[in-house]
Image (cartoon, rainbow, N blue to C red):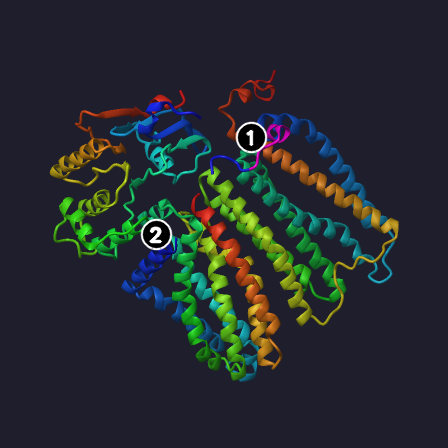
Amino acid sequence: MTQSIWRMPRWFHQMGSPKWFYDFGGILQPWFAVAAFVLLTWGVVWGLAYAPADYQQGNSFRIMYVHVPAAILSQSIFLGMAVAGAIGLIWKMKLAFMVARSCIAIGATFTIIALLTGAIWGKPTWGAYWVWDARLTSTLVLLFLYAGVMALNQAISERQVAGKATAILAIVGTINIPIIKYSVEWWNTLHQSSSFTLTSKPSMPADMYLPLLLTVLGSYCLFALVVLMRTRTQILQTQSGTSWLAQHRDITGA
Amino acid sequence: MIKFMLAIVRRDILLVARQPAEMINPLVFFVLVVALFPLGVSPEASLLSEVAAGVIWVAAMLATLLSLELLFKLDHDDGSLEQLLLAPYPSWTLVLAKVFVHWLVSGLPLILISPLIATMLFLPTHAVPALMLSLLLGTPTLSLLGAIGAALVTGVRGGGMLLTLLILPLYVPVIIFGSSSVAAAAQGMAVDGYIALLAAMFVFALMITPWAAGSALKL
Amino acid sequence: MSFPSSAIFHLLCTDDLACERDLRVLYSGLNFTVKAGELWHIKGRNGAGKTTLLRQLAGLHPVDTGKVLYPRHATKVIYIGHKLGLKEQLTADENLSWLAGLDGSSTQQQRYAALEKVGLRGYEENTVAQLSAGQKRRVALARLHLCKGNIWLLDEPFTSIDQQGIVDEQDWLNQHTLAGGAVLMTSHQEISLPQVKILDLSQYAPL
């Protein structure tokens, strides 16, 4: 389709301009960097060292402060990637494809962290590094989805085609994620005798809950930082022929 | 539009008839994989009958994957895919037509030979109807979902491996419910729920796949 | 967009058409109109985007900037690209049958007549794999005589064709335009027909 079905409001159109994104993103970048550093350090130190020990799991539950943010981010980044891809496909916005591309590596990293910390958490809890519980298994499948998107992006040599193809794959993957999660959970209840789940979220006292909130927020800031940096780099790479970039102070040094 | 789809179906079947190897390969692969299992693990009836449901399903999935790569690749290479896309009909019609032929050639033979396979793995006979029904609903779903991957990797080097990587996560639910239905039947339990879910997944795949694969082909 | 009264003869227009490949702009700001009876020879160096332009006009390549417009509703386009679109295991007749069947139908008599016109009499029941490169291209070109298309988009149609064949082909192009159709084609060969118009893509490339 050469004409978009939905009309873009003006502010939306402005956000799709690489120049605007580059400049505005450049302003936001240091703030996100500081916020990520502060929130993550504060949250992780508080959680790992100072929060009260859980009466049931002792100190091993502390890994939750790293595992839970990683798990949350791994899923929301995939969704975000699909949304960005959809925007790019519907409104033909090149910037949206760039943003989607920036999400892949960071999302996959968070997924790997979630898997590893899940395994570390599993060892003292169940006595084994890997168990086929619902959460870990669906996270593994999510990692395969990320790997697929990454591989497809690299395999297609033409950049624009790669952007559109990965957008379609991300959308199809996102639609399937709830189905996959449901089926794995169901399969797990059929086979797993243990009733212990990694996601038991009982009402936690504030000094257990707050560090978690900090690490989650800090991780989101880190994600925003990485996406800004990577997208701005892609803008530099792809817009090198345009006049606004040639005269930009980052290039001329003025 | 129906005439268009029928024309594609007729053409593809004619092509398969000219090269029957295309039809035999997935079938032979299916039987081989299943046969390798007792050889690689153990020929004990008790062990095999326990894993039979899962092994048959995974083997069926692998056999389907094997033939998926060629779904669009051959037409892309000689330019006939372009001509199909130029026809005044939406691209999802051609996807549906080609997937139908793919299923006829790779899925249907599997379903027909599955009772034989079931005996090789000591699956109890009363589970065979459930096996065939689950495959009947599952193999078209596998073909449909696989078409999305095949469409995305058309024209990409090293498409085969990439295709497998892309589709496997999507296949997880189908495998889970497919093999669980057979396992449940083997234990004498009701399979209605599983079959209903498999049917739902088939309908769902039928709805999103032609659109997704059609868009991917136009890239 | 309003068309002038002579627009009944406009078969195809482009509006500010552009194309990018990777990070390179191939051409931009392409505005031209194809009227009935015109033969456009698209020229440009290798890699200038001639094939991509034809594909954009056919609708095979996505158009991100600008528009391709077919003002008249009943315009039918036949595109024959580098890859011929023939299945090797099918015979020439069968190939024409399904190609024509994409948008209509054909009788065997019509198909045989088309094959005879391109000089393949007697080869109708040979599988395409058995034919030479030039003969394969003739089978693809036979489609032009079989299906009724207003606009012919041809990418290097003289490839592998012998001298006499090229003369014959130019004759078909001539007849088609005289009958009110239009042709857009690429070729490294010069076309010796009076109604040829040149579209030089290098004019639209960035400096």
In the picture of the structure, the residue carrying the numbered disc 2 is: B75
Residue B189 lies in magenta, yes or no? no
Residue depicted at 78% across the width and 37% down the height: A38
Report the number of discs.
2
Kindly identify which chain the residue marked by label 2 belongs to.
Answer: B
Tell me the kind of residue under disc 2: Asp
Depth-wise, is mark 1 or mark 2 nearer the camera? Answer: 2
Q: Secondary structure at mark 1?
A: helix
Kindly identify which chain the residue marked by label 1 belongs to.
Answer: A
Quadrant of the image containing the C terminus of chain C: top left
Spatial CA distance of label 1 from label 2 is: 36 Å
Task: Establish if A121 lies above or below A244.
Answer: below
Instruction: Residue A239 in the image: state x and y as whole percent.
Output: 52, 27
- Is residue A195 left or right of B168 when viewed as pictured? right
Instruction: Residue A73 in the image: state x and y as whole percent.
Output: 68, 47
Tell me the kind of residue under disc 1: Ile
Residue A12 lies in magenta, yes or no? yes
Instruction: Residue B203 in the image: state x and y as whole percent.
Output: 53, 61
In the picture of the structure, the residue carrying the numbered disc 1 is: A235
Give whichever of B13, A72 is nearer the camera.
Answer: B13
Residue depicted at 33% across the width and 56% down the height: B7
Q: Secondary structure at mark 2?
A: helix
Callout 1–callout 2 Cβ contact below 8 Å = no
Residue depicted at 35% across the width and 49% down the height: B84
